């Protein structure tokens, strides 16, 4: 009978260890998911900044072109 009780205790301990390892893995997977979400948010922010920078560059190029045209009117030949 003691052998059965000892075996049950070992099995219970092993099951507890497996449950703990499963919880730890679940927590780790959740942390990875959070990190991926944060990386996605940063990537989207960077994409928006790139679009804004491109629009600003295009606007500056247009302003430079317009200024060049105005300045050409003042050139003395």
Image (spheres, rainbow, N blue to C red):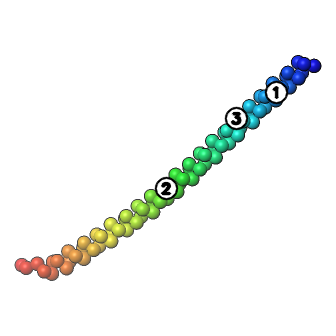
Q: Residue 14: x, y in percent?
A: 77, 28
Above or below: residue 33 compared with residue 12? below
Q: Nearer the viewer, residue 67 or 33?
A: 33
Q: How many marks?
A: 3
Residue placed under numbered mark 3 in the picture:
21
Secondary element type, mark 3: helix
Residue placed under numbered mark 1 in the picture:
11
Residue placed under numbered mark 2 in the picture:
42
Give the CA separation, mark 2 to mark 3.
32 Å
Residue 26: which numbered mark, if any?
none
Above or below: residue 42 compared with residue 14? below
Q: Residue at x 81, y 24 (%)?
A: 10
Taking the image as shown, residue 26 lies to the left or right of residue 9, namely: left
Give the CA separation, mark 1 to mark 3.
15 Å
Q: Residue at x 7, y 79 (%)?
A: 76
Above or below: residue 9 compared with residue 23? above
Between circles 1 and 2, the one closer to the viewer is 1
Secondary element type, mark 2: helix
Quadrant of residue 75 within the rendered picture = bottom left
Quadrant of residue 60 within the rendered picture = bottom left
CB under 8 Å between callouts 2 and 3?
A: no
Between circles 2 and 3, the one closer to the viewer is 3
């Amino acid at each position: 009978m003691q052998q059965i009780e000892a075996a049950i205790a070992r099995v219970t301990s092993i099951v507890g260890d497996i449950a703990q390892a499963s919880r730890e893995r679940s927590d780790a997977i959740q942390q990875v998911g959070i990190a991926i979400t944060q990386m996605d948010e940063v990537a989207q922010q960077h994409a928006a900044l790139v679009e804004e920078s491109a629009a600003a560059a295009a606007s500056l190029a247009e302003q430079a072109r317009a200024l060049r045209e105005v300045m050409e009117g003042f050139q003395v030949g």
